[in-house]
Amino acid sequence: MKRLLIPAALILFSAAPALAQDIAINIKSFKFMIMDASVTAGSTVTWKNLDEEPHTVTSETGLFRSGALDTGQTFSFKFEKPGVYKYRCSIHPQMVGTVTVK
């Protein structure tokens, strides 16, 4: 009877969860510069306002809300669970974005 030996490193590699991938989204010209972002669970997204006007980052479900961000200010949120998270600027509701967490 032959034995099939699988190297331990291969087993560990295939069972390893995806690593978090933190990203930054700039707010400029009344737009979220990445409108449709994709990250893995456990990732942190940081938004930075580069406009002269204040903006917010507000989840449509109420999961997160930045408050008004003045020029140069940032807001970060860690996405723990897979899903599609829609958000907008509550001051300028035409500004919308989505974070998809896998």
Image (cartoon, helix red, strand yellow):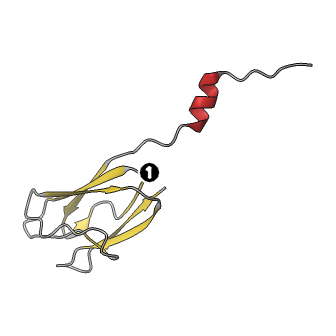
Query: How far from the left and from the top, in percent, is residue 27?
Result: 20, 62
Q: Is residue 43 visible?
A: yes
In the image shown, does 7 or 99 lie closer to the viewer? 7
What is the secondary structure assignment of the residue under circle 1?
loop
Q: Is residue 96 visible?
A: no
Quadrant the N terminus occupies:
top right
Q: Is residue 95 above or below residue 39?
A: below
Q: Which residue is mark 1?
A: 40
Q: Would residue 11 appear left or right of 66 to someone viewing this image?
A: right
Query: How far from the left and from the top, in percent, is residue 16?
Result: 54, 37
Query: How far from the left and from the top, in percent, is residue 95?
Result: 26, 74
Q: Which residue is at 27% across, 68% downward?
A: 64
Q: Would residue 19 appear left or right of 14 to someone viewing this image?
A: left
In the image shown, does 68 or 49 lie closer to the viewer? 68
Q: Residues within 10 Å of mark 1 (few under 14, many from 20)?
A: many
Query: In the rendered image, which quarter is residue 28 located in?
Result: bottom left
* Count of labels in the image: 1
Query: How far from the left and from the top, in percent, is residue 38?
Result: 42, 56
Q: Which residue is at 71% across, 23% downward?
A: 6
Q: Is residue 47 above or below residue 1?
A: below
Residue at the extreme front of the image, as rendered: 1
Q: Is residue 73 above or below residue 29?
A: above
Q: Which residue is at 44% across, 51% downward?
A: 40
